[in-house]
Image (spheres, grey):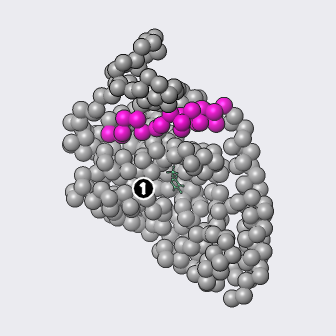
């Protein structure tokens, strides 16, 4: 790995970050707060939230088996994705490499930041080939985007190939594990000490059932986390979200129950889907959704919409021609989908 001062954008490396009132005094002993131009009324919402979310990170560190200094919290994983560009990729100069097909935000954020985006096609089993990916890396490649389990294909990427990219690539490798709670694979967040160039993304939006609170996590070495903290908005995680996630983590049984029943439902739904005449193939998955190749994705999609059932049409994505991406819902929702598909006149 190149040293971080070579990977970081020069303007960010030099940056003296904004220092908020809560950065300069963050103790608990004081009782009179006249430093932040807040309103003394409307407690508790009148006060700015903790800019570094110390309490949340302590709870999360325990829960996730990592150190608090290895955690960044963002307004969804999307903030952590955008920050990777803003911290490390110089617009108009640097480039990034990503697997294809994958999550659309990596490309959108590249475009917004005017950074060249180089996609590498997965193989016919939606698997990563490290050698092929590394062959399009050059001196200006700062980031490699991997997503495992991958969206929209659903499968875990081959662990050995991910490690090969982590070892060979001189820049930063982001492994997006938004769906890791549904996979039996060990998270890469436990391997931060082995790979200093690794950033692992996870989220509260899927297994934790909390997409509305907008909370994403990045796990990385403390030096990378410190760069992220310099660039983020000072109060990027609002007080309501911080309070809600502490409540959520106090009851860790609930998300694991949700995951268990979704995995059970996933097996049942995929089996029934595969039996449909319109279904050509159901692809193996390690997430809370699956990809299926069907006879005519656009027509099936349109007919489902007309009945108020929305799935994701991925037919215009490379390698996903005539594919629909189906999220696993409740038993009733899944039955509604299957019944509609059974009745369908094509
Ligand atoms: C859903 C999803 C996310 C989650 O994004 P949030 O901003 O945390 O809601 C991240 N990555 C991938 C690949 C996803 O599919």
Q: Extreme front residue here?
A: 41
Q: Quadrant of residue 100?
A: bottom left
* Secondary element at tag 1: strand
Residue under the image location 50 percent in, 30 percent down: 45
x and y percentages locating residue 79 in the rendered image: 42, 47
Residue under the image location 48 percent in, 63 percent down: 102
Residue under the image location 21 percent in, 42 percent down: 11
Q: Does the magenta stretch include residue 233?
A: yes
x and y percentages locating residue 182 in the rendered image: 65, 51
**Which residues are drawn in magenta?**
231-250
Residue that numbered label 1 is attached to: 145
Say left or right for 114 vs 27: left
x and y percentages locating residue 321 in the rendered image: 54, 79
Is residue 48 among the parts visible in the rendering?
yes
Quadrant (top left, top right, bottom left, bottom right) of the N terminus: top left
Number of numbered tags placed on the structure image = 1
x and y percentages locating residue 21 in the rendered image: 34, 24
Principal secondary structure, stretch drawn in magenta? helix
Seen in the picture, residue 189 relative to 82 is either above or below; the reply is above
């Amino acid at each position: 790995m190149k040293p971080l001062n070579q990977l970081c954008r020069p303007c960010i490396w030099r940056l003296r970050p904004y220092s908020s009132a809560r950065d300069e005094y963050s103790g608990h002993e004081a009782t009179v707060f006249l430093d932040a131009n807040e309103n003394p009324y409307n407690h508790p919402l009148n006060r700015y939230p903790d800019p570094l979310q110390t309490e949340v990170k302590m709870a999360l560190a325990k829960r996730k088996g990592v150190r608090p200094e290895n955690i960044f919290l963002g307004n969804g994983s999307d903030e952590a994705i955008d920050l990777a560009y803003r911290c490390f990729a110089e617009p108009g100069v640097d480039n990034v490499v990503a697997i294809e097909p994958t999550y659309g935000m990596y490309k959108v954020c590249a475009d917004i930041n005017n950074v060249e985006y180089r996609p590498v096609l997965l193989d016919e089993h939606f698997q990563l080939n490290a050698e092929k990916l590394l062959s399009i890396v050059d001196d200006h490649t700062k980031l490699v985007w991997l997503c495992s389990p991958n969206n929209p294909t659903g499968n875990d990427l081959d662990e050995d190939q991910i490690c090969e990219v982590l070892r060979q690539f001189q820049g930063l490798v982001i492994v997006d594990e938004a769906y890791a709670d549904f996979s039996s694979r060990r998270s890469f967040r436990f391997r931060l000490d082995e790979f200093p160039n690794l950033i692992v993304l996870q989220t509260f939006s899927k297994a934790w059932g909390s997409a509305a609170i907008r909370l994403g996590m990045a796990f990385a070495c403390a030096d990378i986390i410190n760069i992220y903290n310099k660039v983020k908005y000072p109060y990027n995680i609002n007080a309501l979200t911080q309070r809600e996630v502490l409540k959520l983590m106090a009851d860790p049984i609930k998300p694991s129950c949700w995951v268990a029943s979704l995995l059970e439902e996933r097996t049942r739904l995929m089996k029934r889907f595969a039996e449909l005449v319109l279904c050509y193939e159901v692809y193996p998955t390690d997430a809370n959704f699956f990809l299926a190749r069907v006879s005519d994705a656009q027509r099936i999609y349109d007919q489902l919409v007309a009945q108020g059932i929305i799935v994701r049409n991925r037919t215009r994505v490379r390698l996903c021609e005539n594919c629909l991406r189906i999220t696993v819902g409740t038993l009733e929702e899944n039955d509604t989908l299957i019944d509609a598909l059974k009745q369908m006149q094509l």
